[in-house]
Amino acid sequence: MSKVKFRYNPETLSYDKIETGFKYYLSRIFFGFFFGAVLGLVFFFAYSYVIESPKVQRLERENARLTTQFDILSKRLDETVKVLDDIQRRDENIYRVIFQADSIPQSIRKAGFGGVNRYEPLEDLDNAELVISTAKKLDVIMKQAYVQSKSFDEIIEMAKNNEKLIKCTPAIMPISNKDLKRTASGWGYRIHPIYKTRRFHSGMDFTAPTGTDVYATGDGKVSKITREKTGYGNRIEIDHGFGFRTLYAHLSAFNVKLGQKVKRGDVIGFVGSTGTSTAPHLHYEVHVKNKKVNPSHYYFNDLSAEEYEEMIEISSNSNQTFD
């Protein structure tokens, strides 16, 4: 026989009998299941979002380790960029200067990648900013390394032609000048002998008697022969290749023909005073890639260091040219 249960009624101040039929037990079962389900959901969400599982903890440790590795990789890439920059500076300031090669513009050395967004697949990753930054550095390094590799290929090819380059370089004085006394006027501003104005003298003057031999200063081909009553007068130009060109002006006569190939030391003409000239002399110019340069920088096949200093001093003392 089941026990009879009562519930106190505060309004009547008496105990009322609790009916315990089928509905009562059914409601008890329903509330029990409901309470259990709610409690289960609370524990599930607490476990999922508050209490980390061993798998989540393992993934977080792995993510932290990968982030650290990316940081280290990024720093090493920065160091690699510095090394590449140093190689590029050497390439521009040493190798390309030696072989008279054109510089490679920075716009080419460090050009970006156009077109579609190469890094779009990485944008959804965790730490996307770090990953994309590292990927960009790596791409830039690969591009710079490729450009530098092609540059070295070009320099190697020029080095193979080094013997020819040496022969073609205008490396001697254009007239016999062993005692340097024929050095008259050098590169720089001088007083023009006729117009008496201060003008830039873009070559060197050598005084010598009319008919003195004039030599080709490097191997090449005669590219121009002109006869004029003013200016340079009778002149010869030689194309030496590799960007070198030399000019010999105020000649009295020629000893070569247009298109003729010459060797360093060949007699190509004779000193004179043609054109705008006040006395017999040779006006000599060196052009590198269509730009006039100081000829005295190219007498390394003729002069010792002491003789070079003496020649510079002599040419600087004169405040006037002969043309």
Image (cartoon, grey):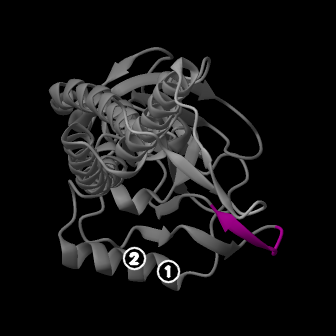
| In front of the other: 71 or 17 | 17
Q: State the residue at coordinates (55%, 27%).
A: 24
Count of numbered circles in the view: 2
Q: Which residue is mark 1?
A: 316
Q: State the residue at coordinates (16%, 25%).
A: 160
Q: State the residue at coordinates (22%, 23%).
A: 157
In the rendered view, would you say 52 is above or below 244?
A: below
Q: Position of residue 175 (x, y in %)?
A: 35, 52
What secondary structure is found at the residue carrying circle 2?
helix
Residues at marks 2 and 1, CA–CA distance in whole angstroms: 6 Å
Q: Position of residue 159 (x, y in %)?
A: 18, 32
Instruction: Note whether residue 173 is visible.
Output: no
Q: Which residue is mark 2?
A: 312
Q: Is residue 110 magenta?
A: no
Query: With 152 as the anchor, is 267 left or right in this view?
Result: right
Tag 2 near tag 1, CB within 8 Å = yes
In the rendered view, would you say 200 is above or below 7?
A: below
| In front of the other: 111 or 214 | 111
Q: Amino acid at mark 2?
A: Ile
Which segment did they paint magenta?
A: 195-201
Q: Is residue 199 magenta?
A: yes
Where is residue 134, by image quadrant?
A: top left
Instruction: Note whether residue 255 is visible.
Output: yes
Query: With 320 as the anchor, is 72 left or right in this view?
Result: left
Which residue lies most toward the top here? 259
